[in-house]
Image: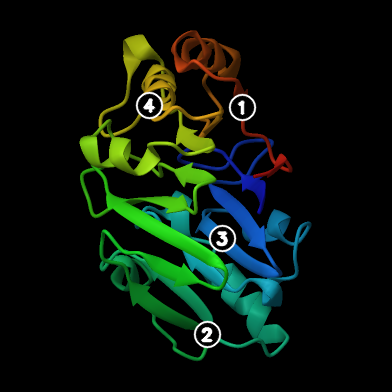
Amino acid sequence: MRFTVVGCAGSVPGPDSASSCYLVEQDGYRLLLDLGTGSAGPLQRYCAPEQVDAVLVSHAHIDHYFDLNALSYLRQRVGAAPLDVYGPANLPAALRWTDEALLRLHTVTPPGPLALGPLAVRLAAVEHGMESYAYRVGDALCYTGDTAPCAELDKLADGCAVLLAEACGYEADSVPRHLSAADAGLLAARAGARLLVLTHLRSWLDHDRLLAEAAAVAGCPVVLATPGLRLRA
């Protein structure tokens, strides 16, 4: 399985990155974890729009789903089949349109699992003040989405090889309903993860400080997500 960071900025696009979007590839199958604001452009560096097989949306905030519109338009231009999109029940209302010629929307229900091509996906309902999910792709990857620390996230992350976790603030000044960098590090330690990748990086924060706070408690290597970062698991 190959994993590529397409966008990793938190809340809004930053000067160097689109909002959250991550490409997972296995045996020719291409799955996106989120498709946030501005991500459909850089996505084309890694695959053609019509090559995307499915999208998993963690929750209906625009920095996690907004470029479904742009990707649908690009796919329509080349006559691609409707795109399968899996996400919370409130996603269709957030999109404000549900043209089945472009998108096939599927409501996810925990605990799953979902069989998406060769990928086995599990999900957990997490705590973000709205319907929100974290996703586990096989044994290799766990993506937190946006969430406060919670027991369901701990269960989902347990034993993962790579933990892709938001780092939305500092330990001393954490943001409600989000993980701080230290929270992400502690989650990695509890899960026994082999690598922690910090994402949802707000452009106005000191990313080196986030990295240091997570690394102090993670018990495994920690890196910052950057557009174009590619890992194999």
- What residue lies at 26% left-to-right and 60% top-to-bottom? 110
Name the residue that disc number 4 marks: 187
Q: Are marks 2 and 3 in contact (CB under 8 Å)?
A: no
Instruction: Identify which amino acid the numbered label 1 is placed on.
Output: Leu
Q: In the rendering, which numbered label is found on residue 224? A: 1
Where 32 falls versus 2 (above or below)?
below
Residue 121's quadrant in the figure? bottom left
* Alpha carbon separation for disc pair 4 and 1: 16 Å
Where residue 107 appears, as percent x and y from the top left, is 31, 72
Of mark 2 and mark 3, the one earlier in the sequence is 3
Q: In the displayed structure, does residue 171 sit left or right of residue 39?
A: left
What label does residue 102 carry, if any? 2
Q: Amino acid at mark 2?
A: Leu
Q: Is residue 93 left or right of residue 164?
A: left
Q: Quadrant of the C terminus?
A: top right
Quadrant location, the N terminus: bottom right
Amino acid beneath label 3: Leu
Instruction: Report the Cα–Cα distance between label 1 and label 3.
Output: 19 Å
| Proximity of marks 2 and 4: CB atoms separated by less than 8 Å | no
Query: Is 79 situated above or below 40?
Result: below
Of callouts 3 and 4, which one flags the residue occurring earlier in the amino acid sequence?
A: 3
Q: Residues within 10 Å of mark 2 (few under 14, many from 20)?
A: many
Q: Residues within 10 Å of mark 4 (few under 14, many from 20)?
A: many
Marks 2 and 3, how far apart in space? 16 Å
Which of the two residues, 65 or 88, is positioned nearer the viewer here? Answer: 88
Q: Nearer the viewer, mark 2 or mark 1?
A: 1
Q: Amino acid at mark 4?
A: Leu
Residue at the disc numbered 3: 32
- Dot 2 or dot 4: first in sequence order is 2
Disc 1, SS? strand
